[in-house]
Each structure stands twice: as C-alpha cells, then as structure tokens.
Image (spheres, rainbow, N blue to C red):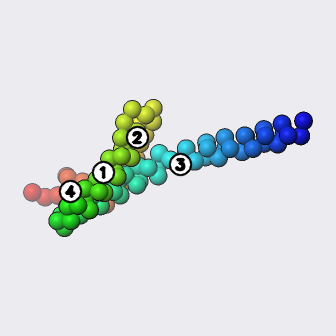
C-alpha cells in the first residue's frame, strides 16, 4: 500500500509541475518568438542575411506551434505586444 501512495504523490507532483510549466509556456514562447522576429529584422538591416534567416526560422518554428492550437489567439496577442513593444504607433509618425 505504501508504494501506491508514493506513486500517487509522484504522479500528482508531476501533473502539477506540467500544469505550472504549460501556463507560462504561451507567454514565454510569444516573447521568444517576438525577440527572434525583431532580431531577424535588425540582422536584415545590417545585411547579416544568414543570421537573419536563422533567427526568422527559429521564430517561425515557435509561431507554427500555435497555429492550430486552442490558445492561438492568446499567443498571437502576446506575440504582437512583445514584437511591437518598442515601436511607435503609425499615427505618431508625421509624414
């Protein structure tokens, strides 16, 4: 009986850890994808095209993970927030 209780404890602990990791996963994935996207843009502007391509592919791999995911809307919202965090809104730019 002691072994079953021990297994249940480990199983419960494992499920709780999985739950906690998955909750932070969307936000951290969105942030990482946005950072890689912005890095790719900077590298392109600096004509570091091979590096830009690598950064873009890494970002795209993360983005694709959420394409048909049930929480894709939340991921996309957070991704855009992180990606555009330091950019001026278009209406603030005088043409």
Relative to 47, residue 71 above or below: above
- In the image, which is nearer the foreground, mark 4 or mark 2? 2
Mark 2 or mark 4, which is nearer the start of the sequence? 2
Q: Mark 1 sits on what residue? A: 57
Percent coordinates x, y for residue 21 in the rendering: 57, 48
Mark 1 or mark 2, which is nearer the start of the sequence? 1
Question: How far apart, in angstroms, are the residues tagged by discs 1 and 4?
Answer: 31 Å
Percent coordinates x, y for residue 34 in the rendering: 35, 53
Mark 4 or mark 3, which is nearer the start of the sequence? 3
Q: Mark 4 sits on what residue? A: 92
Q: Nearer the viewer, residue 85 or 43?
A: 43
Q: Does dot 3 land on a helix, a strand or a loop?
A: helix
- Residue sitting at x 61%, y 42%: 19
Question: How far apart, in angstroms, are the residues tagged by discs 3 and 2?
Answer: 15 Å
Horizontal placement of 21 versus 58: left or right? right
Residue 24: mark:
3
Question: How far apart, in angstroms, are the residues tagged by discs 2 and 1?
Answer: 12 Å
The reply to whether residue 48 is visible in this rendering is yes
Name of the residue lying farthest toward the right: 1
Q: Mark 2 sits on what residue? A: 65
Question: How far apart, in angstroms, are the residues tagged by discs 4 and 2?
Answer: 34 Å
Question: How far apart, in angstroms, are the residues tagged by discs 3 and 4?
Answer: 33 Å
- Are the residues flagged by discs 1 and 4 in contact, CB closer than 8 Å? no
Q: Does dot 4 land on a helix, a strand or a loop?
A: helix
- In the image, which is nearer the foreground, mark 1 or mark 3? 1
């Amino acid at each position: 009986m002691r072994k079953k209780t021990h297994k249940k404890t480990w199983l419960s602990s494992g499920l709780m850890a999985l739950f906690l990791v998955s909750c932070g996963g969307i936000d951290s994935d969105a942030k990482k994808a946005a950072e890689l996207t912005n890095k790719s843009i900077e590298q392109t502007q600096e004509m570091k095209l091979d590096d830009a391509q690598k950064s873009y592919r890494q970002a795209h791999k993360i983005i694709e993970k959420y394409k048909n995911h049930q929480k894709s809307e939340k991921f996309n919202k957070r991704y855009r927030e992180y990606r555009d965090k330091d950019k001026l809104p278009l209406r603030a730019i005088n043409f």
